[in-house]
Image (cartoon, rainbow, N blue to C red):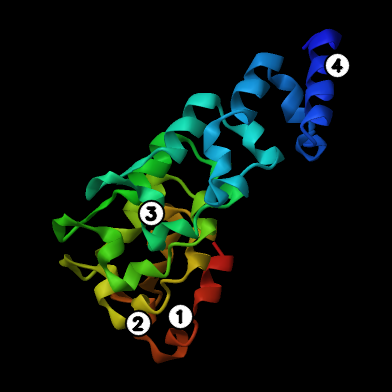
Amino acid sequence: MNSTEKILIDIYLKKIGREDLNCDKLYERSYNYVVDILEMPEWKDPRFAKLLTSTIWHSNYEDVKDILSMPHPNDSNKLIWDDERFANLLTSNIWHSNYGDVKNILSMPHPNDPKKLIWDDERFANLLTSTIWNSNYDDVKNILSMKHPNDPKKLIWDDKRFAKLLTSNIWNSNYEDVKNILSMKHPDDPNRLIWDDKRFAKLLTSNIWNSN
């Protein structure tokens, strides 16, 4: 960015009283780009106003516009953000994801019933926190649709021992780690899971996702 563009951006931010949006990433954008983002009418909606932080410069105009205007997968007359389950995901962390990931994650069909969203399943509903944006669509999909290592006709989450691990901490892990941890074989008997051993079963708490 040339010095003239930087000066214009600084003057503009001061004029609208948003000097808090200043960061190094901002100056990778052009003056016109910054104005286009900050003059979007969507910011008048109080739900979206809180998303206007310096992390927005990690995204691009098209992604920002498409994310904020995303229709609900079950009702094209509503925004997805009109659904209370998804409204609490509106934090500045969302700008670490692109439109494709956001759309695919929130409109993900249930692996056992494609007519339903996976989030209609009460077991998964509490995973809808802003930490989900630390993950990506492929990891979210693969984790939630993971088959049981002893019964491929069932989800691993149908097993009560593992269902209690469904907390937002899971987004600290990727799919491969989750899969490898839960399908770990017993060192003394490769036909059993390590979690079949009562000595290790007590380790099955959501803190396990702080490991790899």
Disc number lying in front (4 or 1)? 4
Residue 155 appears in which quarter of the rendering? bottom left
Say which label, 2 or 4, has the lower sequence index.
4
- Indicate the secondary structure of the residue bearing disc 1: loop
Rounded to the nearest angstrom, the CA distance separating label 4 from label 1 is 55 Å
Disc number lying in front (2 or 3)? 3
What residue is drawn where x is 73% and y is 29%?
A: 25
Residue position marked by numbered label 2 in the rendering: 161
Disc number lying in front (4 or 3)? 3
Q: Which amino acid does label 4 sit on?
A: Ile
Residue position marked by numbered label 1 in the rendering: 204
Say which label, 4 or 1, has the lower sequence index.
4
Q: What residue type is labelled 3?
A: Asp
Q: Are marks 2 and 4 in contact (CB under 8 Å)?
A: no
Q: Are marks 1 and 2 in contact (CB under 8 Å)?
A: yes
- Indicate the secondary structure of the residue bearing disc 4: helix
